[in-house]
Amino acid sequence: MDALAIVLLLFGAYLFGSIPTSYWMARLVRDIDIRKYGSGNVGISNFSRHVGKRWAIAVILFDVAIKGPVPLVLASSKVLDLGLTAEVGAGLAVIAGHNWSIFIRFSGGRGMGTVLGVIGSLSFLLVWIYLLSSFSIWLITWATTGRRDSSVSWVISAALMPVYSVLLDLPSEVAYYALIFLGITMVKRATSNDPSYWRKVDGVIPAVKLLLIRILFDRDTLSREGWVGRSPPPDPSVRSEDS
């Protein structure tokens, strides 16, 4: 019975994580496909820039306070009592759903908001250390290079999360969660939301260099502003009023 419950929990967590909050909200508010703007990421940062910070608050609240914690609460002793391993599995499943949503052809966000909700359910202290670490690295990067780019600080903090788990003497399941989450983050950044871009840059940016840029900076170019500010070309089928 527990095995069946765990399988259903993981499947349900993936589907719940697949709810593309930013995508649907962008459609509702501005009638745009957020995947065609900026980074193409169906996440809070890209949404905030191209739809609006005011609307981003609702997305943040859902992803952090509802999408991340709910599957873990269901697995916890308060509801199904399936154990910490099931909680960790549910957390990873909901992040995988967020990153590769079945509702938008397996594209998605990076899961940073959702992962905060997941971590908060596993260890609230780890959330604060993770955020403090990310902010500190961002501050150091800004002070030394002049770049206000959070993508590097996020990935370094994710790489340090298994270390934090061990130093805080958290359960081994949490350390394994941190390690697997790091792997998910690397895969998501490396593959991006548009695999066809590998063909677009063929002969322009060497594949190894592109891979490093994606992993470190979470984009396909070194220019941040040129990347996050992108918008789709005008639709030639739509004639202007002057034509």
Image (cartoon, grey):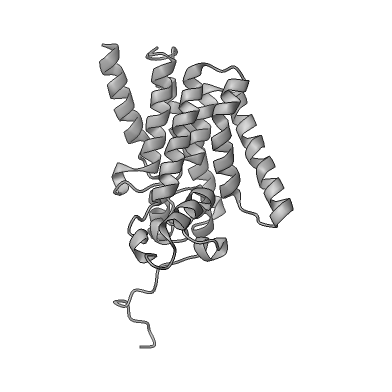
Q: Nearer the viewer, residue 128 or 69?
A: 128
Q: Is residue 196 above or below residue 55?
A: below
Q: Is residue 165 above or below residue 212?
A: above
Residue under the image location 63 percent in, 40 percent down = 134
Q: How many marks?
A: 0
Q: Is residue 112 visible?
A: yes
Residue 235: x and y, percent? 34, 74
Q: Quadrant of residue 3?
A: top left
Residue under the image location 29 percent in, 17 percent down = 5
Q: Judge left or right: residue 149 versus residue 74.
A: right
Residue 125: x and y, percent? 62, 24
Q: Quadrant of the C terminus?
A: bottom left
Q: Is residue 55 above or below residue 96?
A: below
Q: Quadrant of the N terminus?
A: top left
Q: Is residue 209 above or below residue 186?
A: below
Q: Nearer the viewer, residue 65 or 105?
A: 105
Residue 72: x and y, percent? 43, 23
Q: Quadrant of residue 198?
A: bottom left
Residue under the image location 35 percent in, 30 percent down = 13
Q: Nearer the viewer, residue 19 or 89?
A: 89
Residue under the image location 53 percent in, 49 percent down = 216
